[in-house]
Amino acid sequence: METDELGNDTVTEERDIVRVAGWAVPRAAEPKLAGHARRTVEVELFAPVGTFRPQDAVELPERDDVLEVIGEPENYEHNLFGWAPGLEVVNLGGTQ
Protein backbone atom coordinates (compact mmCIF):
# COMPACT_ATOMS: atom_id res chain seq x y z
CA MET A 1 0.00 0.00 0.00
CA GLU A 2 1.25 3.48 -0.80
CA THR A 3 1.47 6.38 1.64
CA ASP A 4 1.04 10.12 1.17
CA GLU A 5 3.52 12.84 2.19
CA LEU A 6 2.30 12.59 5.82
CA GLY A 7 2.77 8.83 6.03
CA ASN A 8 -0.96 8.03 5.80
CA ASP A 9 -2.03 4.93 3.89
CA THR A 10 -3.63 5.77 0.56
CA VAL A 11 -5.78 3.70 -1.76
CA THR A 12 -4.39 3.17 -5.23
CA GLU A 13 -7.09 3.61 -7.86
CA GLU A 14 -7.43 0.53 -10.00
CA ARG A 15 -8.99 0.85 -13.47
CA ASP A 16 -9.99 -2.03 -15.69
CA ILE A 17 -11.41 -1.83 -19.19
CA VAL A 18 -14.43 -4.14 -19.46
CA ARG A 19 -16.02 -5.08 -22.77
CA VAL A 20 -19.82 -5.00 -22.43
CA ALA A 21 -22.71 -5.81 -24.77
CA GLY A 22 -24.05 -2.25 -24.52
CA TRP A 23 -25.91 0.20 -22.35
CA ALA A 24 -29.14 2.16 -22.43
CA VAL A 25 -30.94 4.92 -20.58
CA PRO A 26 -34.24 3.57 -19.17
CA ARG A 27 -37.27 5.37 -20.62
CA ALA A 28 -40.57 5.17 -18.74
CA ALA A 29 -43.16 7.45 -17.16
CA GLU A 30 -41.86 6.50 -13.72
CA PRO A 31 -38.13 6.34 -12.89
CA LYS A 32 -36.54 2.92 -12.40
CA LEU A 33 -35.41 2.51 -8.78
CA ALA A 34 -32.80 0.01 -7.58
CA GLY A 35 -30.81 -1.00 -4.54
CA HIS A 36 -31.67 -0.87 -0.86
CA ALA A 37 -31.85 2.93 -0.90
CA ARG A 38 -34.15 2.87 -3.98
CA ARG A 39 -31.92 5.18 -6.02
CA THR A 40 -32.88 6.31 -9.52
CA VAL A 41 -31.25 4.29 -12.30
CA GLU A 42 -29.66 6.56 -14.90
CA VAL A 43 -28.14 3.84 -17.11
CA GLU A 44 -28.62 0.09 -17.55
CA LEU A 45 -25.37 -1.63 -18.50
CA PHE A 46 -25.45 -5.08 -20.16
CA ALA A 47 -22.29 -6.75 -18.88
CA PRO A 48 -20.78 -10.23 -18.47
CA VAL A 49 -22.07 -12.04 -15.38
CA GLY A 50 -19.99 -11.41 -12.26
CA THR A 51 -18.01 -8.48 -13.62
CA PHE A 52 -19.47 -5.70 -11.43
CA ARG A 53 -20.20 -5.36 -7.71
CA PRO A 54 -22.33 -2.83 -5.81
CA GLN A 55 -20.64 0.58 -5.48
CA ASP A 56 -18.12 -0.04 -8.30
CA ALA A 57 -17.36 3.16 -10.21
CA VAL A 58 -18.05 3.05 -13.95
CA GLU A 59 -16.99 5.41 -16.73
CA LEU A 60 -18.71 5.08 -20.11
CA PRO A 61 -16.93 6.34 -23.23
CA GLU A 62 -19.77 8.61 -24.38
CA ARG A 63 -20.51 10.21 -20.99
CA ASP A 64 -18.57 12.76 -18.98
CA ASP A 65 -19.73 11.62 -15.53
CA VAL A 66 -18.67 8.76 -13.28
CA LEU A 67 -21.51 6.38 -12.40
CA GLU A 68 -21.87 3.95 -9.52
CA VAL A 69 -23.29 0.42 -9.51
CA ILE A 70 -26.58 0.49 -7.59
CA GLY A 71 -27.42 -2.73 -5.73
CA GLU A 72 -26.76 -6.22 -7.05
CA PRO A 73 -26.75 -6.75 -10.83
CA GLU A 74 -29.94 -8.31 -12.26
CA ASN A 75 -29.08 -11.85 -13.36
CA TYR A 76 -31.66 -13.62 -15.53
CA GLU A 77 -29.58 -16.74 -16.24
CA HIS A 78 -31.86 -19.01 -14.20
CA ASN A 79 -35.06 -19.22 -16.21
CA LEU A 80 -37.44 -21.93 -17.38
CA PHE A 81 -36.18 -21.76 -20.96
CA GLY A 82 -32.63 -22.89 -20.12
CA TRP A 83 -31.11 -20.01 -22.07
CA ALA A 84 -28.15 -18.34 -20.38
CA PRO A 85 -26.78 -15.45 -22.47
CA GLY A 86 -23.91 -14.75 -20.05
CA LEU A 87 -25.10 -11.17 -19.45
CA GLU A 88 -26.71 -9.34 -16.57
CA VAL A 89 -28.24 -5.90 -16.18
CA VAL A 90 -26.09 -3.60 -14.06
CA ASN A 91 -28.00 -0.56 -12.76
CA LEU A 92 -25.94 2.64 -12.66
CA GLY A 93 -26.64 5.96 -10.98
CA GLY A 94 -24.80 9.16 -10.18
CA THR A 95 -22.08 8.96 -7.54
CA GLN A 96 -23.02 10.16 -4.10
Image (cartoon, helix red, strand yellow):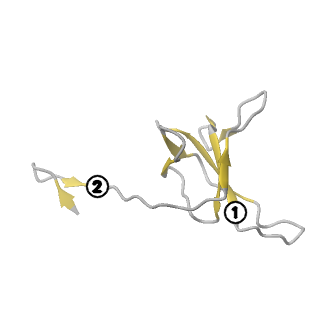
- Could you tell me residue 57's position as x and y percent? 47, 49
Query: Which residue position holds label 2?
Result: 11
Left or right: where 12 falls relative to 70? left
Q: Residue 32 has which mark?
A: none
Residue at 66% across / 53% down in the picture? 22
Left or right: where 78 falls relative to 22? right
Query: Which residue position holds label 1?
Result: 87
Residue at 40% across / 58% down in the picture? 15
Judge whether 82 appears above or below 20 on screen.
Answer: below
Residue at 76% across / 61% down in the picture? 76
Q: Of 54 and 42, which appears nearest the observer?
A: 42
Q: Amino acid at mark 1?
A: Leu
For marks 2 and 1, the one nearer the N-term is: 2
Q: Splitting the image into 4 quarters, where does residue 30 fall?
A: top right
User: Considering the numbered disc 1 on the image, is that residue within a helix, a strand or a loop?
Assistant: strand
Q: Amino acid at mark 2?
A: Val
The mark tally for this picture is 2
Callouts 2 and 1 close, C-beta under 8 Å: no
